[in-house]
């Protein structure tokens, strides 16, 4: 009788452990989905604001560069062509610097909003998949064994 009670207690503990693991895996999965949704929502807002700021900067920079190039080319004949080439290179370098500043600001803004990077999301997704597989493996093994025993008992041929 004591052996049967002990076996029943162990079976209940294993069932509780499996339920706890399933619950934890579900919570991890939901947290991952929530983080992904938040990143999409907040990322889109930040992205749109940065696009608007970029449009303004682009317009100002183009006007400035065009104004400088036309002033230089109207003053000097042949030298104007050389100056234009230098101004274009300088404007290109300035534009490249502005792009770098913009990219840095975007990254900083996304970081301030705690928007996870694609690497972080991939790592989280991989971890959730691993945990789900472990839970399924642990939850699936006892269920199969008990199903086999029950079907053998019910089957008059065995």
Image (spheres, rainbow, N blue to C red):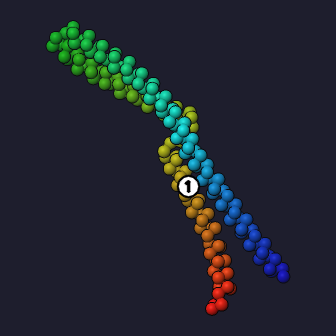
Q: Nearer the viewer, residue 130 or 54?
A: 54
Is residue 38 visible in the rendered image? The answer is yes
Residue at label 1? 127
For residue 17, what is the image quadrant? bottom right
Q: Could you tell whether 59 is left or right of 157 in the image? A: left
Using the rendered image of the protein, determine whether residue 105 is visible from the camera's viewpoint.
Answer: no
Q: Is residue 123 left or right of residue 19?
A: left
Q: Secondary structure at mark 1?
A: helix
Task: Name the one closer to the observer, 132 or 105.
Answer: 132
The image position of residue 99, as x and y in percent, is 39, 28
Outermost residue toward the left?
A: 78
Q: Percent from the top left, x then y, of residue 3?
A: 80, 80
Taking the spot 71% from the left edge, 69% from the top edge, the residue there is 14
**Residue at the location (31% across, 21% down)?**
91
State the quadrant of the C terminus: bottom right
Query: Residue at 35% of width from left, 27% of height from top?
Result: 96
Left or right: 87 with respect to 121?
Answer: left
User: Residue most toward the bottom?
Assistant: 157
Residue under the point 38% across and 26% down: 97
Measured as percent of width and height from the top left, residue 101 is found at 43, 27
- Where in the figure is residue 79, as x and y percent of width and height? 18, 13
Rate crowding at label 1 as few (under 14), some (14 to 19) or many (20 or more) other CA atoms within 10 Å.
some
Instruction: State whether residue 71 is above or below residue 19.
Output: above
């Amino acid at each position: 009788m004591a052996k049967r009670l002990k076996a029943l207690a162990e079976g209940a503990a294993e069932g509780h452990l499996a339920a706890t693991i399933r619950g934890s895996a579900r919570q991890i999965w939901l947290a991952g989905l929530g983080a992904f949704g938040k990143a999409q929502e907040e990322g889109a807002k930040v992205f749109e604001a940065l696009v608007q700021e970029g449009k303004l900067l682009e317009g100002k920079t183009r006007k400035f560069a065009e104004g400088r190039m036309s002033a230089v080319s109207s003053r000097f004949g042949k030298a104007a062509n050389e100056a234009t080439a230098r101004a274009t290179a300088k404007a290109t370098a300035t534009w490249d610097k502005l792009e770098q500043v913009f990219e840095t600001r975007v990254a900083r803004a996304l970081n301030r909003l705690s928007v996870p990077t694609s690497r972080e999301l991939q790592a989280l997704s991989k971890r959730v998949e691993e945990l789900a597989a472990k839970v399924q493996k642990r939850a699936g093994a006892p269920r199969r064994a008990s199903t086999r025993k029950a079907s053998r008992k019910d089957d008059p041929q065995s």
